[in-house]
Each structure stands twice: as C-alpha cells, then as structure tokens.
Amino acid sequence: MQIDWITVSAQIVNFLLLVWLLKHFLYGPVIRAMNRREERISERLDEAREREKEAQQEARRYEQKTAELEAQREEMLATARQEAEEEKKRLLDEARTEAHEARDEWRQEVERERVDFLDGLRRHIGRNFHDLARKALGELADARLEAQVVEVFIDRLKSLDQEDARALAADTDRLAVASAFELDSATRSRLTRAIHDELGKNLDVEYRQAEEVVCGLVLAGGGVRIGWNLAHYLDDLAAAVEETLAAPEAARE
Amino acid sequence: MTISPDSIILLQWGPLHLTATVAYTWLVMALLVLVSWLVTRRLSTGTGMSRWQNLVEVLVTGMRDQIRQVSRQDPGRYLPFVGSLFIFIATANLLNVVPGYMAPTGSLSTTTALAICVFVAVPLYGVVYEGPVRYLRHYVRPTWLMLPFNVIGEISRTIALAVRLYGNIMSGTVLAGILLSLTPYFFPVVMQLLGLLTGMIQAYIFAVLAMVYIASATSAHEAQN
C-alpha cells in the first residue's frame, strides 16, 4: 500500500479534465437534446390540442349546416307537396266545373233540339192532319171543310150554357172570331147572326185570320173559348208524341 | 506479482515518471470522450433516435434521478461531478475483463486523488451555494465542542472513501491472481464476474457517498428555501 503523490496529482488533473470533457461532450448535449425534445413534444401536444379543438368546431359547424340543409329541404318538400296538392285540387275543380258545364250545355242542347223537334213535329203533324182532314172531309161530303167547321161552331154556340154565354159577353161589346182560313161574306153574316142570336144583338163581331188556329174557328172572350179547332187535337197528339219521346229520356235518367 | 499499476513505470523524465495508472486512466478517458463525442455528434431531438443515443439518455436520466433522490435538489449542478465519478469508476472497473488491462481504480493513488476531489468539492459546493458563514456553521453544530469531531469526521470519511474503493478493486485483482495460481482455468472466471459486480457496486457507492456528503453541506440552505 503505497501512494505515489505524482500519480495522485496527475490523476486529480486527469479527473478534472474528464469532468470538463464529459460535461462538454456528454451531459450538455444530451440534456439539451432531451429538453428540446420535451419542448417539441409539448409544442406538438399543444398544436394537436389546438387542431382537435378546431376540428371539433369544424365538425360542429358542419353538423349545424347539415341540420339547416335538412330543415330547408324538409320545408321545401312540404311547400312543394302543398303546392302540388293545391294544384291538383284546382285542376280537379276546374275539370269538374268544365265537365258540369259541358254536361249542362249538352243537356240544354238536347233539350233545345227536343223542343225544336217536337215543335216541328207538331206543326208538321197538324199541317198534314189539316190537309188529310180537309181532303177526307172534302171527299166524304160535298160541303167544304170550312162550312162544316162553321156548322160545328154554330152548333156549339147554340149548345152553350147560360153561364158561359154571360161570361163571354159580360164586359165587352166586341168579340173576335179567329179562323185559319179566310171566311167569305156569306159565312161571316151567318156567324154574326148566330152570335147575335145567342149572345146579344149589340155585340160587334170582328174577324181575323190567325196562324195558331191550325184549322177551325175560335171565339174567345171573358176567359171562355168556344169553337172547333184542329189545334186542340194536334196539341193532344203532340202531347202524346211528347210523352212517348220523353219516356226513354225519363228511363235513361 | 504486481498488485498495483503504480509499480509499472512506463516513462521516466528525471523526477517525473509516467505510471501505468495514468496511462490506463488516459485510455479510459479517451474511450469515454470518444464514445460521447460519437454519440452526441448527431443528436436527434425528434421522436426517433439511435440506440446509442437512447443508451446515453437512459444513463444520463438515471443518474439525474439518482442525484435528485439522494440530494432532494435540482441535479443540474451536481451531475457533471458526481456523474463523472460514477462513469469513470464504472468504466475503469468494467474494463477489467480485457486481458492485460489493469484498472486504475486498483491503485491507491487514483482512489486518493478521487477522494481528495470529493474532499475539496464538498466545502466548495457548500460555500458556493450556501455562503461561507452558513457553511462553516455546520462544524459547530450542535455545540462548539463538536468542532474537532466534525473536522476529524470530514477527514476520516475521505480516507475511508479512498481506501474502500482501492481495497475492493485491488482485492479483486489480488484474488484473481492468487486463485489463478491455486485453481486455474474456471474458478478465476467466476471471481472475475464477481469482480465486475463489485466494481459496479463500488462505482455506485462512491458516487452516491460523494453526493451525500455534498448534499449534507448544501441541504440546510435548500431546506430554508
């Protein structure tokens, strides 16, 4: 066990040198590097935290936007649905109204045609009947149809009951005789005489020709009509024909 | 049989001579500095790093943690001194496995030099970080009567530090030499392994004791803070 003091002093110097060298080459750089790494890691963590926050905000914003868009879409769909519904209703109403109008128009048209047809038929039948009756009466008897009509008229005038006669001559001194054909003067005087005999001497009698009297003679006044008129028969016939024509229509409706 | 590398003198200039102790110390120093320089030449501050850097960082972090545990102070100002003690002694002891190498820590001159360094460093740290008056007051505690005992204790623990390390390392070498002559081949290998363990433990003990002495000189100041 010996101590070499030269070696001891050399070793002290050596050790101090080693301390300095290691401080310079080992501890300093390593600790600096570690500190820097820690700083960078904490920086990155901060950065990551920041980014996460931003991302969350972004995500929230997007969610909100999506919700808004969804709501908007729903609203638009609802509006469109409502509009379509209204449009449909409107179109249906329009179509219904048009159909109603068309049906009404068609009905009126049919009605008009029916009336026209019946009118024409009545007139035609009347005329034909008039011609036929005249022809038949002319062929059956020597007397002219008008004369026969005049006879029938006078007969009816004579068989008139008191009440009707009074009503005819009650509030007028003038009576009109309507005929389908032109009466000659002899017939007129005969008629006038007959009227004077039956109703009163002081009555004026006027003669006129009338379309509506298809065939025959009519004396009207005080709400009473007497005479013989083919139009009555024709009206009956027309009513019968009309009834027949209306029957299928009624059945159809 | 050579017990101490001090007895091997490589060069001689008049009164100055270069012993094997100094030469091996230089070798260890050169190795440490070279490795440190190679590793710390390109340090990565990112997440990826080389294995060597990882090793060095583990070493440095471990030493810092140990110093913090022992001293309960910031390890920054003690790390170069205490850490160098540990690294130097550990490396010098570990290289014992290399044939022909003789640990410089097996020389009483080296361990004395290191103990003297600690002996000087303790009051130095105390004075620098506590102030001279407050540091010197440690010697008269709890009473003036304790002053001589405190001084003796200071000196004796320094001697103990030096002799403990020297004895442990030298004994390892001596044991290996004796066993080699008695039971050659295998048994000395086991003793060599034991010697490596002892060397590491001694390096740790030396550094921790140095730290404890320094901490005891500066703790009062830190405690007040």
Image (spheres, rainbow, N blue to C red):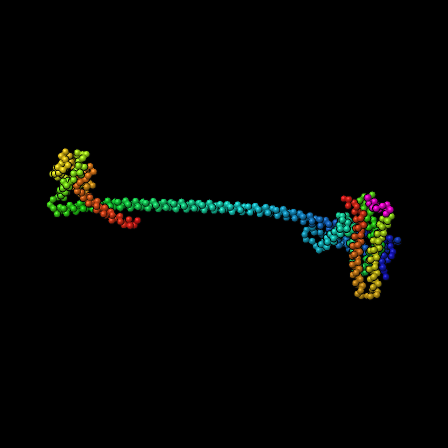
Placement of A126 over or under B3, stated as above or below: above
Residue drawn at x 36%, y 45% as measured from the top left: A97
Quadrant assignment, res A227: top left
**Is B54 contained in the magenta span?**
no
**Quadrant location of the N terminus of chain A in the rendered image:** bottom right
Q: Is residue B31 left or right of residue A153?
A: right
Q: Nearer the viewer, residue A226 or A188?
A: A226
From this viewpoint, is residue A177 visible?
no
- Residue plotted at (24% across, 44% down): A119
Residue B54 sits above or below residue A162 on the image:
below
The x and y percentages for residue B70 are 77, 51
Asked if one can make out residue B185 in the rendered structure from this viewpoint, the answer is: yes
Residue A90 rendering spot, x and y as whole percentages: 40, 45
Whether residue B140 appears in magenta in the rendering, the answer is yes
Could you tell whether B93 is left or right of A177 in the image? right
| x 29%, y 50%: residue | A251
The residues colored magenta run B134-147
A123 vs A18, left or right, is left
> How many numbered circles does the render carry?
0
* Percent coordinates x, y for residue A115 in the rendering: 26, 45
Nearest the camera: B138 or B104? B138
Residue B114: where, in percent of width, then height?
A: 82, 52
**Residue closest to the eye, A155 or A41:** A155
Magenta portion: prevailing SS class: helix
Left or right of B204 on screen, residue A50:
left
